[in-house]
Amino acid sequence: MIRATEAHRPALERALRRDAARAMFPLGNLAAHGMSGTGHRNATTYWVDDTADPSAVLGLTQSGGAMVYGPDTFDPGAMAAILKGRALTGINGAAGPVRAVMAAAGLTGAPAILDADEPQFLLDLAELDVPAGPGHLVPVSDQLETAIGWRMAYEDELHPPARPISAEDPPEWATNGTYRMLVDRGTPLAMTGLNARLPDIVQIGGVYTPPASRGRGLARRVVALHLAEARAQGVRQATLFAASDAAVACYTPLGFQRIGDFALVLFDGEVTP
């Protein structure tokens, strides 16, 4: 594979946009941080199999996150060769290509706090119907302590133990306007966020409802309201991953359709193939 430069950016972007739902993370990083690969933990260096018309793309963030994009049939050994000797914190992408690269790199079974193939869903926002219910959206910065407590509970449910988060030094998601909270008469009910955003498609993540309030459709309503807000700003599609049967039951009534499986792997510390 060939390391992509600024001159290759148009071809790289075209390749990723062919299936933007499965390429949200590398596309989002490209839009936010360009081609430098430095200056931010999500700044990404890219490799392509063809500089004129790529079909396979490997991204590697400054923090060690690998992002795999490619067809079901490609040469995983070429990506594995690039990853060899590098300290990795995780890897993600469509499940088939990711698992092939992990096998080729000797990463299958590496210690991980999260190693899952989750069903991925896509929704045409023209089909979105917001369910009735209580509450309205506010930025999570309006309810910062609650948002941080909920995020830690969310992380602890997915891959415990949750890492501490400080309200005195809040993370980027809590202050950059990408997360929303459903609030009714001053009472926080549920939370949702955008893990990646492009002009025409967003990826939903961080959806959380406290256990005592579950089963009331609050997660479905907060996601729908957030997507309706995005639709009003010109976004046409939304994608997400469902970590449980309860999540599937929440999202499918909104019109989300399954498009495949997405592999999400977070290593337990750094792993070097």
Image (cartoon, rainbow, N blue to C red):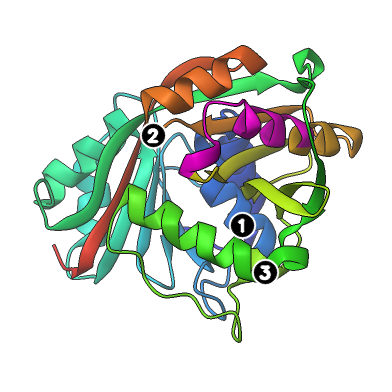
Which residue in the structure is indicated by mark 3?
Answer: 144
Q: Which residue is mark 2?
A: 243
- How packed is label 3: few (under 14 Cα within 10 Å), some, or many (20 or more)? some
**Mark 2: amino acid:** Ala
Disc nearest the viewer among 1 and 2: 2
**154 or 48, which lies in front?**
154
In the picture, measured across the screen, residue 212 lies left or right of residue 168, that is left
Q: Which residues are magenta?
A: 211-225
Is there any visible trace of residue 188 in the rendered image?
A: yes
Q: Single out the mark in the foreground, 1 or 3.
A: 3
Answer whether labels 2 and 3 touch (C-beta < 8 Å). Answer: no
Magenta span: chief secondary structure: helix
Q: Residue furthest bottom?
A: 168
Measured as percent of width and height from the top left, residue 129 is found at: 78, 16
Res 232 → quadrant: top right
The secondary element bearing badge 2 is classed as: loop
How much space separates mark 1 and mark 3, taking CA atoms?
29 Å
Question: Percent position (x, y) of residue 97?
Answer: 30, 34
Q: Which residue is mark 1?
A: 30
